[in-house]
């Protein structure tokens, strides 16, 4: 993950300081890219300890089309709690949504694009894309988008990672993928975004009978909040360690098997990170 650390350092040293929605302030870069060949290991941060479980559960939450983040809270995953609190929803003119709802956010658009919340009358982009890869593997239209201008007003947080795309490499029998972010918090958010989309690549590849290929990230507004500078400097003093391998222990040849996957069905082998950084600031909301 040397390229992640290079991005972190670049943003610290050359990023432009500006105000932002959260009021915390940030340093930002525009139009950054990163790439990982996942035959060399699973891209997870090693210069501080992080957890795949959070990324796994959130990714499966999206894949299953679930919109009630209380499901994640019941698993002690509270990453959406601040952005789906009663106050945050009310302040976002979404008083009609129940506390914990992401409304027409990621899950809804992936599995029910354009449909009514919790009523399956939209387009199932995930299922359609997987079917298209099976039928036309070398097509250039394997795309899933979370950005729906007609429904942006019905979600408390417009999608940050707004599109992911896939292609098949016939020489390596591998599935390549990329994800595009309009905005991302490099220290806190990006490591989980990388894990989430690396996980999707592994899951889709196994489901379709391919090897995991390369993963590409494109970030439009990649930023470090001003209260994260100390933790970033500490992280940059640490040497990255070898990447682990991700093992999926269950067969997921059918779509139902894919959706029923649990965290106990996957395993990171060889993850030996540095300790986490103490006294991290709270996430900017």
Image (cartoon, rainbow, N blue to C red):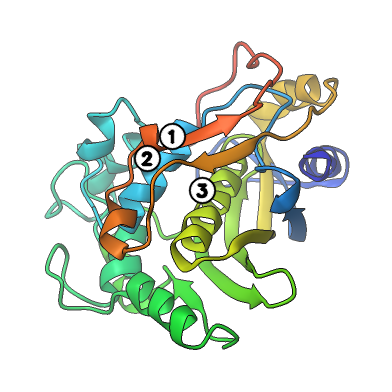
Give the structural element (helix, strand or loop) at label 3.
helix
Report whether 153 appears left or right of 33: left
Report whether 23 appears left or right of 89: right
Picture quadrant where residue 165 is located: bottom right
Pointer 1: residues within 10 angstroms few (<14), some, or many (20+)?
A: some
**Residue 217 higher or lower than 235, as above or below:** below
Which residue does the image show at 42% across and 77% down from the upper left? Answer: 129
Which residue does the image show at 88% across and 39% down from the upper left? Answer: 13
Q: What residue is shown with label 3?
A: 196
Q: What residue is shown with label 2?
A: 57
Give the structural element (helix, strand or loop) at label 2.
helix
Picture quadrant where residue 271 is located: top right
Pointer 3: residues within 10 angstroms few (<14), some, or many (20+)?
A: many
Report whether 243 appears left or right of 72: right
Pointer 2: residues within 10 angstroms few (<14), some, or many (20+)?
A: some
Q: CA distance from mark 1 to mark 2?
A: 5 Å
Q: Is residue 219 visible?
A: no
| Precedes in sequence: disc 1 or disc 3 | 1
């Amino acid at each position: 993950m040397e390229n992640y650390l290079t991005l972190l350092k670049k943003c610290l040293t050359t990023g432009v300081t500006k105000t932002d929605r959260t009021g915390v302030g940030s340093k930002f870069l525009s139009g950054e890219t990163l790439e990982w060949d996942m035959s060399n290991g699973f891209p997870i941060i090693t210069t501080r300890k992080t957890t795949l479980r959070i990324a796994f559960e959130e990714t499966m939450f999206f894949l299953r089309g679930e919109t009630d983040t209380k499901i994640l809270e019941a698993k002690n995953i509270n990453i959406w709690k601040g952005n789906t609190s009663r106050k945050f929803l009310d302040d976002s003119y979404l008083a009609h949504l129940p506390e914990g709802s992401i409304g027409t956010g990621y899950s809804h658009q992936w599995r029910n694009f354009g449909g009514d919340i919790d009523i399956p009358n939209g387009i199932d982009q995930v299922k359609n894309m997987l079917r298209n890869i099976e039928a036309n593997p070398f097509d250039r239209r394997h795309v899933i988008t979370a950005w729906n201008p007609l429904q942006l007003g019905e979600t408390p947080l417009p999608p940050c990672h707004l599109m992911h795309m896939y292609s098949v490499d016939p020489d390596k029998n591998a599935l390549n993928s990329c994800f595009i972010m309009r905005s991302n918090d490099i220290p806190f958010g990006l490591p989980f975004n990388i894990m989430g989309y690396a996980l999707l690549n592994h899951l889709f590849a196994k489901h379709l009978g391919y090897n995991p290929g390369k993963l590409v990230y494109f970030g439009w507004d990649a930023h470090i909040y001003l209260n994260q500078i100390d933790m970033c400097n500490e992280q940059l003093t640490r040497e990255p360690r070898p990447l682990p391998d991700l093992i999926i222990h269950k067969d997921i040849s059918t779509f139902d098997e894919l959706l029923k996957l649990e965290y106990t069905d996957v395993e990171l082998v060889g993850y030996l990170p540095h300790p986490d950084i103490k006294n991290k600031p709270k996430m900017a909301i």
